[in-house]
Image (cartoon, grey):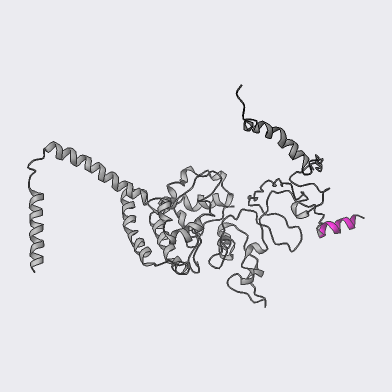
Amino acid sequence: MRRIPIHAFLPVLAAAVLPLLLAACGDRDPAPEIRPPAPPISARGNPAQDIDNLRRNVPILSEITPLPMATVENFDMTRGRAYPMQPPTIPHSIDGYQVDLNSNRCMLCHARSNAAQFQAPPVSVTHYMDRDDQFLAEVSPRRYFCVQCHVTQTNARPLVANGFRDIDEVLRSERMQ
Amino acid sequence: MRLLRRGRDGLVSLWAQFNRPARYLSLGFLTMGGFIAGIVFWGGFNTALEATNTEVFCTSCHEMEANVFEELKSTIHYTNRSGVRATCPDCHVPHDWTDKMARKMQASKEVWGNIFGTIDTREKFLDNRLKLAQHEWDRLKANDSLECRNCHDYDSMDLTRQASRAAFVHRSYLATGEATCIDCHKGIAHKLPDMTGIPQGVQSLPSLPSPH
Protein backbone atom coordinates (compact mmCIF):
# COMPACT_ATOMS: atom_id res chain seq x y z
CA MET A 1 0.00 0.00 0.00
CA ARG A 2 1.28 3.37 -0.92
CA ARG A 3 1.89 5.59 2.05
CA ILE A 4 -0.03 8.82 1.90
CA PRO A 5 2.21 11.70 2.97
CA ILE A 6 1.07 13.68 5.97
CA HIS A 7 1.00 16.99 4.21
CA ALA A 8 -1.88 15.75 2.05
CA PHE A 9 -4.05 15.97 5.17
CA LEU A 10 -2.91 19.42 6.10
CA PRO A 11 -5.73 21.33 4.43
CA VAL A 12 -8.30 19.04 6.05
CA LEU A 13 -6.61 19.47 9.38
CA ALA A 14 -6.53 23.20 9.03
CA ALA A 15 -10.15 23.32 8.08
CA ALA A 16 -11.07 21.36 11.19
CA VAL A 17 -8.81 23.13 13.66
CA LEU A 18 -9.02 26.75 12.56
CA PRO A 19 -12.62 27.44 13.58
CA LEU A 20 -11.94 25.81 16.90
CA LEU A 21 -8.87 27.94 17.39
CA LEU A 22 -10.72 31.07 16.48
CA ALA A 23 -13.54 30.19 18.79
CA ALA A 24 -11.14 29.53 21.65
CA CYS A 25 -9.16 32.69 21.47
CA GLY A 26 -10.75 36.08 21.80
CA ASP A 27 -14.19 37.19 22.80
CA ARG A 28 -16.40 35.12 20.61
CA ASP A 29 -19.49 35.40 22.72
CA PRO A 30 -22.15 36.42 20.30
CA ALA A 31 -22.75 39.90 21.61
CA PRO A 32 -26.41 40.69 21.28
CA GLU A 33 -26.68 43.33 18.64
CA ILE A 34 -28.43 46.17 20.34
CA ARG A 35 -29.89 48.49 17.84
CA PRO A 36 -32.26 51.26 18.69
CA PRO A 37 -35.58 50.83 17.01
CA ALA A 38 -35.31 52.53 13.70
CA PRO A 39 -36.94 55.90 14.15
CA PRO A 40 -39.44 56.87 11.56
CA ILE A 41 -37.37 59.41 9.73
CA SER A 42 -39.32 61.57 7.44
CA ALA A 43 -38.04 64.60 5.67
CA ARG A 44 -38.73 66.49 8.86
CA GLY A 45 -36.95 64.07 11.16
CA ASN A 46 -38.26 62.77 14.44
CA PRO A 47 -38.70 65.46 17.08
CA ALA A 48 -38.98 62.80 19.80
CA GLN A 49 -35.32 62.02 19.30
CA ASP A 50 -34.19 65.50 19.94
CA ILE A 51 -30.56 64.99 19.18
CA ASP A 52 -29.68 67.83 16.94
CA ASN A 53 -32.08 70.48 15.89
CA LEU A 54 -29.80 71.63 13.14
CA ARG A 55 -30.05 68.20 11.58
CA ARG A 56 -33.83 68.43 11.81
CA ASN A 57 -33.74 65.97 14.79
CA VAL A 58 -32.40 63.16 12.66
CA PRO A 59 -29.91 60.99 14.62
CA ILE A 60 -26.30 61.56 13.74
CA LEU A 61 -25.83 58.10 12.29
CA SER A 62 -28.83 58.26 10.00
CA GLU A 63 -29.03 59.74 6.61
CA ILE A 64 -31.34 62.69 6.18
CA THR A 65 -33.90 62.48 3.48
CA PRO A 66 -33.58 65.88 1.91
CA LEU A 67 -36.58 68.11 1.75
CA PRO A 68 -38.04 68.44 -1.69
CA MET A 69 -36.52 71.34 -3.58
CA ALA A 70 -38.66 74.41 -3.32
CA THR A 71 -39.40 76.48 -6.38
CA VAL A 72 -39.47 80.23 -6.40
CA GLU A 73 -42.93 81.68 -6.82
CA ASN A 74 -43.04 83.50 -10.12
CA PHE A 75 -46.48 84.99 -10.67
CA ASP A 76 -45.91 88.74 -10.71
CA MET A 77 -48.71 89.51 -8.25
CA THR A 78 -48.03 91.85 -5.36
CA ARG A 79 -48.27 90.07 -2.02
CA GLY A 80 -49.72 91.65 1.06
CA ARG A 81 -47.37 92.71 3.81
CA ALA A 82 -47.35 90.95 7.13
CA TYR A 83 -46.65 94.14 9.07
CA PRO A 84 -46.59 97.84 8.20
CA MET A 85 -42.87 98.32 7.61
CA GLN A 86 -42.19 94.97 5.99
CA PRO A 87 -40.04 95.26 2.86
CA PRO A 88 -42.25 93.97 0.04
CA THR A 89 -41.34 90.49 -1.14
CA ILE A 90 -40.32 89.82 -4.72
CA PRO A 91 -43.14 88.12 -6.63
CA HIS A 92 -40.97 86.82 -9.47
CA SER A 93 -37.83 84.74 -9.89
CA ILE A 94 -34.50 86.54 -9.89
CA ASP A 95 -32.30 83.74 -11.21
CA GLY A 96 -29.04 85.05 -12.56
CA TYR A 97 -29.73 88.68 -11.71
CA GLN A 98 -26.44 90.47 -11.38
CA VAL A 99 -26.42 92.97 -8.55
CA ASP A 100 -22.89 94.10 -7.85
CA LEU A 101 -20.54 97.02 -8.28
CA ASN A 102 -20.81 96.78 -12.07
CA SER A 103 -24.51 96.49 -12.63
CA ASN A 104 -27.86 96.28 -10.87
CA ARG A 105 -30.34 94.16 -12.77
CA CYS A 106 -33.26 95.02 -10.46
CA MET A 107 -32.96 98.71 -11.26
CA LEU A 108 -33.44 98.07 -14.97
CA CYS A 109 -37.16 97.94 -14.22
CA HIS A 110 -37.57 99.26 -10.68
CA ALA A 111 -35.62 102.49 -11.08
CA ARG A 112 -37.86 105.51 -10.98
CA SER A 113 -37.07 106.34 -14.60
CA ASN A 114 -37.92 102.87 -15.95
CA ALA A 115 -40.78 101.85 -13.69
CA ALA A 116 -43.62 103.16 -15.84
CA GLN A 117 -42.27 101.52 -18.96
CA PHE A 118 -42.31 98.08 -17.37
CA GLN A 119 -45.20 98.66 -14.99
CA ALA A 120 -42.88 97.75 -12.15
CA PRO A 121 -43.32 99.26 -8.69
CA PRO A 122 -40.70 101.99 -8.47
CA VAL A 123 -38.24 101.97 -5.63
CA SER A 124 -39.51 104.03 -2.71
CA VAL A 125 -38.23 107.59 -2.30
CA THR A 126 -36.54 106.62 0.95
CA HIS A 127 -34.11 104.56 -1.12
CA TYR A 128 -32.82 107.73 -2.73
CA MET A 129 -32.04 109.33 0.61
CA ASP A 130 -28.69 109.18 2.27
CA ARG A 131 -28.42 108.93 6.04
CA ASP A 132 -28.71 112.69 6.42
CA ASP A 133 -32.04 112.57 4.57
CA GLN A 134 -30.55 114.28 1.54
CA PHE A 135 -32.05 113.09 -1.75
CA LEU A 136 -29.67 111.69 -4.33
CA ALA A 137 -30.19 111.25 -8.05
CA GLU A 138 -29.38 107.58 -7.91
CA VAL A 139 -30.34 104.95 -5.41
CA SER A 140 -28.40 105.47 -2.21
CA PRO A 141 -25.38 103.18 -1.79
CA ARG A 142 -26.73 101.91 1.51
CA ARG A 143 -29.89 100.73 -0.30
CA TYR A 144 -28.12 99.38 -3.35
CA PHE A 145 -28.21 95.66 -2.60
CA CYS A 146 -31.88 94.88 -3.00
CA VAL A 147 -31.92 91.32 -1.67
CA GLN A 148 -30.63 92.44 1.69
CA CYS A 149 -34.25 93.27 2.47
CA HIS A 150 -36.37 92.14 -0.45
CA VAL A 151 -36.51 88.42 -1.02
CA THR A 152 -38.26 85.95 -3.23
CA GLN A 153 -40.70 83.47 -1.74
CA THR A 154 -40.78 79.75 -2.41
CA ASN A 155 -43.51 77.17 -2.18
CA ALA A 156 -41.68 75.40 0.67
CA ARG A 157 -43.65 74.38 3.75
CA PRO A 158 -42.60 76.47 6.77
CA LEU A 159 -40.21 74.52 9.01
CA VAL A 160 -41.62 76.04 12.17
CA ALA A 161 -45.08 77.25 12.99
CA ASN A 162 -45.59 80.99 13.10
CA GLY A 163 -48.10 82.59 15.42
CA PHE A 164 -47.49 86.13 14.26
CA ARG A 165 -50.52 88.38 14.30
CA ASP A 166 -50.80 91.58 12.40
CA ILE A 167 -51.47 94.73 14.45
CA ASP A 168 -54.81 95.16 12.72
CA GLU A 169 -55.76 91.67 13.71
CA VAL A 170 -54.78 92.31 17.32
CA LEU A 171 -56.80 95.51 17.46
CA ARG A 172 -59.78 93.86 15.84
CA SER A 173 -59.79 91.01 18.33
CA GLU A 174 -59.54 93.49 21.20
CA ARG A 175 -62.45 95.43 19.86
CA MET A 176 -64.47 92.23 19.60
CA GLN A 177 -64.02 91.51 23.27
CA MET B 1 22.91 89.86 -55.72
CA ARG B 2 24.03 86.41 -56.77
CA LEU B 3 21.64 84.87 -54.30
CA LEU B 4 18.79 86.93 -55.69
CA ARG B 5 19.58 85.84 -59.25
CA ARG B 6 19.72 82.20 -58.21
CA GLY B 7 16.43 82.50 -56.45
CA ARG B 8 14.83 84.05 -59.48
CA ASP B 9 16.23 81.31 -61.74
CA GLY B 10 14.82 78.70 -59.39
CA LEU B 11 11.42 80.29 -59.48
CA VAL B 12 11.47 80.53 -63.26
CA SER B 13 12.35 76.87 -63.71
CA LEU B 14 9.72 75.86 -61.17
CA TRP B 15 7.09 77.84 -63.03
CA ALA B 16 8.22 76.30 -66.33
CA GLN B 17 7.86 72.85 -64.83
CA PHE B 18 4.46 73.72 -63.41
CA ASN B 19 3.20 75.32 -66.58
CA ARG B 20 4.24 72.46 -68.93
CA PRO B 21 1.63 69.88 -69.96
CA ALA B 22 2.06 66.56 -68.19
CA ARG B 23 4.36 64.33 -70.18
CA TYR B 24 3.82 60.91 -68.57
CA LEU B 25 0.65 61.22 -66.51
CA SER B 26 -2.67 60.49 -68.17
CA LEU B 27 -5.48 63.00 -68.23
CA GLY B 28 -7.64 60.47 -66.35
CA PHE B 29 -5.08 60.18 -63.57
CA LEU B 30 -4.79 63.93 -63.25
CA THR B 31 -8.55 64.39 -63.22
CA MET B 32 -9.25 61.63 -60.74
CA GLY B 33 -6.16 62.51 -58.71
CA GLY B 34 -7.22 66.12 -58.55
CA PHE B 35 -10.71 65.10 -57.56
CA ILE B 36 -9.54 62.81 -54.77
CA ALA B 37 -6.94 65.29 -53.57
CA GLY B 38 -9.70 67.90 -53.53
CA ILE B 39 -11.83 65.72 -51.28
CA VAL B 40 -8.90 65.04 -48.98
CA PHE B 41 -7.81 68.65 -48.73
CA TRP B 42 -11.26 70.13 -48.38
CA GLY B 43 -12.22 67.46 -45.90
CA GLY B 44 -9.03 68.10 -43.97
CA PHE B 45 -9.63 71.84 -44.01
CA ASN B 46 -13.16 71.45 -42.81
CA THR B 47 -12.19 68.98 -40.10
CA ALA B 48 -9.50 71.33 -38.84
CA LEU B 49 -11.96 74.20 -38.93
CA GLU B 50 -14.56 72.27 -36.99
CA ALA B 51 -11.91 71.24 -34.48
CA THR B 52 -11.33 74.91 -33.72
CA ASN B 53 -15.08 75.32 -33.32
CA THR B 54 -15.45 73.30 -30.16
CA GLU B 55 -15.62 74.20 -26.52
CA VAL B 56 -12.62 71.99 -25.80
CA PHE B 57 -10.57 74.06 -28.21
CA CYS B 58 -11.80 77.39 -26.84
CA THR B 59 -11.15 76.47 -23.23
CA SER B 60 -7.71 75.11 -24.02
CA CYS B 61 -6.60 78.74 -23.62
CA HIS B 62 -6.11 79.80 -20.04
CA GLU B 63 -7.81 83.15 -20.72
CA MET B 64 -11.05 81.52 -21.79
CA GLU B 65 -10.98 78.70 -19.31
CA ALA B 66 -10.31 80.76 -16.19
CA ASN B 67 -12.54 83.74 -16.96
CA VAL B 68 -15.45 83.40 -19.31
CA PHE B 69 -15.94 79.65 -19.18
CA GLU B 70 -15.94 79.68 -15.40
CA GLU B 71 -18.66 82.33 -15.42
CA LEU B 72 -20.72 80.45 -17.97
CA LYS B 73 -20.93 77.41 -15.72
CA SER B 74 -23.50 78.86 -13.35
CA THR B 75 -25.80 80.17 -16.07
CA ILE B 76 -28.76 78.53 -17.73
CA HIS B 77 -26.86 78.18 -20.97
CA TYR B 78 -24.54 75.70 -19.30
CA THR B 79 -26.83 73.78 -17.00
CA ASN B 80 -30.61 73.56 -16.99
CA ARG B 81 -33.45 71.11 -16.51
CA SER B 82 -33.55 69.68 -20.02
CA GLY B 83 -29.82 69.42 -20.60
CA VAL B 84 -29.82 71.30 -23.88
CA ARG B 85 -26.89 73.63 -23.75
CA ALA B 86 -24.96 76.15 -25.75
CA THR B 87 -21.24 75.77 -26.21
CA CYS B 88 -18.92 78.70 -26.94
CA PRO B 89 -19.17 78.61 -30.76
CA ASP B 90 -22.97 78.37 -30.67
CA CYS B 91 -23.10 81.99 -29.60
CA HIS B 92 -19.75 83.39 -30.64
CA VAL B 93 -19.23 81.96 -34.14
CA PRO B 94 -21.72 82.59 -36.93
CA HIS B 95 -23.11 79.40 -38.41
CA ASP B 96 -23.14 80.53 -42.05
CA TRP B 97 -19.99 79.71 -43.94
CA THR B 98 -18.91 83.14 -45.18
CA ASP B 99 -19.65 84.81 -41.85
CA LYS B 100 -17.87 82.01 -40.08
CA MET B 101 -14.78 82.51 -42.25
CA ALA B 102 -14.83 86.24 -41.56
CA ARG B 103 -15.08 85.62 -37.81
CA LYS B 104 -12.32 83.03 -37.95
CA MET B 105 -10.05 85.53 -39.66
CA GLN B 106 -10.83 88.09 -36.97
CA ALA B 107 -10.05 85.46 -34.39
CA SER B 108 -6.46 85.37 -35.56
CA LYS B 109 -6.05 88.52 -33.49
CA GLU B 110 -7.12 86.50 -30.47
CA VAL B 111 -4.32 84.03 -31.22
CA TRP B 112 -1.96 87.01 -31.22
CA GLY B 113 -3.39 88.11 -27.89
CA ASN B 114 -2.91 84.65 -26.48
CA ILE B 115 0.71 84.45 -27.61
CA PHE B 116 1.62 87.88 -26.28
CA GLY B 117 -0.50 87.65 -23.13
CA THR B 118 -2.85 90.59 -23.68
CA ILE B 119 -5.26 89.34 -21.02
CA ASP B 120 -3.27 86.61 -19.35
CA THR B 121 -4.15 87.69 -15.82
CA ARG B 122 -7.52 88.24 -14.20
CA GLU B 123 -6.71 91.92 -13.68
CA LYS B 124 -5.86 92.50 -17.32
CA PHE B 125 -9.02 90.67 -18.29
CA LEU B 126 -11.18 92.81 -16.03
CA ASP B 127 -9.53 95.97 -17.35
CA ASN B 128 -10.40 94.97 -20.90
CA ARG B 129 -13.72 93.42 -20.12
CA LEU B 130 -15.87 96.34 -21.27
CA LYS B 131 -14.03 96.56 -24.59
CA LEU B 132 -14.31 92.82 -25.18
CA ALA B 133 -17.98 92.77 -24.25
CA GLN B 134 -18.64 95.77 -26.48
CA HIS B 135 -17.25 93.84 -29.45
CA GLU B 136 -19.75 91.06 -28.91
CA TRP B 137 -22.66 93.42 -28.26
CA ASP B 138 -21.86 95.31 -31.44
CA ARG B 139 -21.63 92.12 -33.44
CA LEU B 140 -24.94 90.77 -32.15
CA LYS B 141 -26.63 94.12 -32.57
CA ALA B 142 -25.42 94.32 -36.17
CA ASN B 143 -26.63 90.86 -37.15
CA ASP B 144 -29.94 91.18 -35.23
CA SER B 145 -28.86 88.66 -32.58
CA LEU B 146 -28.49 85.96 -35.20
CA GLU B 147 -26.71 83.54 -32.87
CA CYS B 148 -29.49 83.83 -30.27
CA ARG B 149 -32.09 83.27 -32.93
CA ASN B 150 -30.44 80.10 -34.14
CA CYS B 151 -32.16 78.52 -31.16
CA HIS B 152 -34.62 81.11 -29.83
CA ASP B 153 -37.17 81.71 -32.53
CA TYR B 154 -39.77 84.37 -31.77
CA ASP B 155 -42.39 82.60 -33.87
CA SER B 156 -41.99 79.51 -31.72
CA MET B 157 -42.19 81.37 -28.40
CA ASP B 158 -45.34 80.56 -26.50
CA LEU B 159 -45.92 83.89 -24.80
CA THR B 160 -48.63 82.41 -22.60
CA ARG B 161 -46.01 80.23 -20.99
CA GLN B 162 -43.74 83.13 -20.21
CA ALA B 163 -43.96 85.28 -17.13
CA SER B 164 -46.44 88.02 -17.85
CA ARG B 165 -43.91 90.83 -17.83
CA ALA B 166 -41.54 88.84 -20.06
CA ALA B 167 -44.38 88.19 -22.49
CA PHE B 168 -45.31 91.86 -22.47
CA VAL B 169 -41.80 93.02 -23.22
CA HIS B 170 -41.27 90.41 -25.93
CA ARG B 171 -44.57 91.27 -27.54
CA SER B 172 -43.95 95.01 -27.46
CA TYR B 173 -40.31 95.23 -28.36
CA LEU B 174 -39.08 92.00 -29.92
CA ALA B 175 -42.12 91.34 -32.11
CA THR B 176 -42.13 94.87 -33.44
CA GLY B 177 -38.43 94.70 -34.21
CA GLU B 178 -37.81 97.72 -32.02
CA ALA B 179 -35.28 95.81 -30.02
CA THR B 180 -33.20 92.75 -30.60
CA CYS B 181 -32.28 90.08 -28.06
CA ILE B 182 -28.95 91.56 -27.03
CA ASP B 183 -30.50 94.96 -26.20
CA CYS B 184 -31.97 93.50 -23.02
CA HIS B 185 -30.19 90.21 -22.51
CA LYS B 186 -26.70 91.46 -21.87
CA GLY B 187 -24.68 89.57 -19.31
CA ILE B 188 -26.77 86.40 -19.44
CA ALA B 189 -23.89 84.01 -20.04
CA HIS B 190 -21.00 85.99 -18.54
CA LYS B 191 -20.71 88.65 -15.87
CA LEU B 192 -21.21 92.26 -16.89
CA PRO B 193 -18.43 94.84 -16.90
CA ASP B 194 -18.93 98.21 -15.25
CA MET B 195 -22.17 99.35 -16.91
CA THR B 196 -22.10 102.97 -15.79
CA GLY B 197 -23.49 105.08 -18.60
CA ILE B 198 -24.27 102.15 -20.87
CA PRO B 199 -27.95 101.89 -21.72
CA GLN B 200 -29.29 98.52 -20.68
CA GLY B 201 -32.60 96.92 -21.34
CA VAL B 202 -34.68 99.11 -23.56
CA GLN B 203 -33.62 102.29 -21.84
CA SER B 204 -32.55 103.82 -25.11
CA LEU B 205 -35.77 102.96 -26.90
CA PRO B 206 -38.94 105.05 -27.04
CA SER B 207 -41.45 104.41 -24.32
CA LEU B 208 -44.49 102.33 -25.17
CA PRO B 209 -48.03 102.78 -23.82
CA SER B 210 -48.82 101.02 -20.62
CA PRO B 211 -49.73 97.33 -20.94
CA HIS B 212 -52.67 97.54 -18.57
Residue A170 part of the magenta segment: yes
Q: Nearer the viewer, residue A55 or B134?
A: A55
Magenta highlight on residue B85: no
Q: Which residues are magenta?
A: A167-177
Q: Is residue B105 left or right of residue A111?
A: left
Quarter of the image with the C terminus of chain A in it: bottom right
The residue depicted at 66 percent of the width and 47 percent of the height is A69
The answer to whether residue A76 is seen in the rendering is: yes
Q: Residue furthest right?
A: A177
> Front-most of B97 and A13?
A13
Q: Residue at x 47, y 62 (%)?
A: B204
Main SS, magenta region, reads helix
- x and y percentages locating residue B144 in the rendered image: 40, 53
Q: Nearer the viewer, residue A162 or A46?
A: A46
Q: Position of residue B38 (x, y in %)?
A: 23, 43
Q: Position of residue A100 (x, y in %)?
A: 57, 65
Rendering quarter of residue A15 = top right
Residue B3 position, x and y percent, is 10, 66
